[in-house]
Image (tube, rainbow, N blue to C red):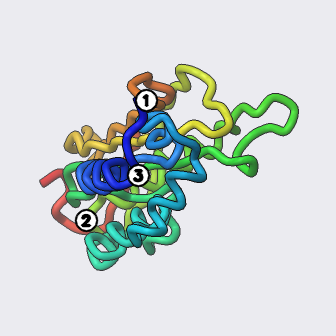
């Protein structure tokens, strides 16, 4: 049985407050209504679209924090960041990210998301990728959302900061990489 508009909008607002990065598509499935109905409900409730919610959170929390590159140069949207520890970004795979003949994402977009996140997590004005070990574990398709999670794992024997990045679609790992980062400061690995 479908909920009344008032009840649905109340639950919609609560759901978005609890999980601000949920898509309109997931909300439509959750409430068994069309995507257009969700969009109209959001408009009536003055709730911005997902991309605007993400930008608002990211710019308010991390714009002054990321040192190695401007936020707009990070591929994907940073949704969590603790310098020299961890970071998370999301990338929605759109038409411009895929091969036209099969709608499979080009690997360089997944790499760019992971690599730019590895740079962003470093607490230094200069952070460069010296080397990376990568593994693509499954194809990513048009309209999927890739969540990349970076963790700083210390320094290797050459003094490079090691950043491990795993990328997921839903709960399935699609990419894994270890990035060996050069940084200019004297606090490597601390």
Quarter of the image containing the N terminus?
A: top left
Please give the name of the residue rendered at 74% of the width and 41% of the height, measured from the top-left corner.
98
Where disc 3 sits, the SS reads helix
Please give the name of the residue rendered at 50% of the width and 71% of the height, measured from the top-left corner.
72
Q: Which mark is residue 123?
A: 2
**How much space separates mark 2 and mark 1, taking CA atoms?**
29 Å
Q: Which mark is residue 170?
A: 1
Q: Is residue 57 above or below residue 15?
A: below
Please give the name of the residue rendered at 24% of the width and 45% of the height, measured from the top-left corner.
152
Q: Position of residue 88 (x, y in %)?
A: 34, 49
Q: Position of residue 41 (x, y in %)?
A: 46, 59
Horizontally, residue 112 falls left or right of residue 165, namely right
* Contact, mark 2 vs mark 1 (Cβ under 8 Å): no
The image quadrant of residue 53 is: bottom left
Residue at the disc numbered 3? 5
Please state which of the two labelled residues, at mark 2 or mark 1, is closer to the viewer. Answer: 1
Where disc 2 sits, the SS reads loop
Q: Position of residue 44 (x, y in %)?
A: 44, 69
């Amino acid at each position: 049985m479908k909920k009344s508009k008032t009840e649905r909008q109340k639950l919609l607002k609560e759901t978005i407050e609890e999980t601000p990065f949920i898509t309109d598509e997931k909300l439509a499935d959750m409430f068994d209504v069309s995507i257009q109905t969700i969009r109209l409900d959001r408009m009536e409730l003055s709730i911005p679209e997902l991309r605007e919610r993400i930008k608002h959170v990211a710019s308010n929390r991390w714009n002054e924090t990321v040192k190695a590159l401007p936020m707009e140069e990070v591929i994907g949207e940073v949704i969590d960041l603790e310098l020299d520890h961890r970071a998370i970004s999301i990338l929605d795979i759109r038409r411009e990210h895929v091969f036209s003949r099969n709608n499979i994402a080009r690997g360089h977009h997944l790499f760019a998301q992971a690599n730019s996140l590895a740079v962003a997590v470093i607490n230094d004005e200069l952070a460069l990728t010296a080397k990376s070990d990568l593994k693509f574990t499954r194809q990513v398709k048009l309209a999927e959302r890739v969540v990349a999670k970076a963790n700083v794992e210390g320094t290797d024997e050459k003094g490079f900061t090691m950043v491990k990045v795993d990328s997921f679609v839903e709960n399935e790992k699609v990419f894994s990489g270890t990035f060996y980062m050069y940084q200019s400061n004297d606090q490597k690995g601390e």
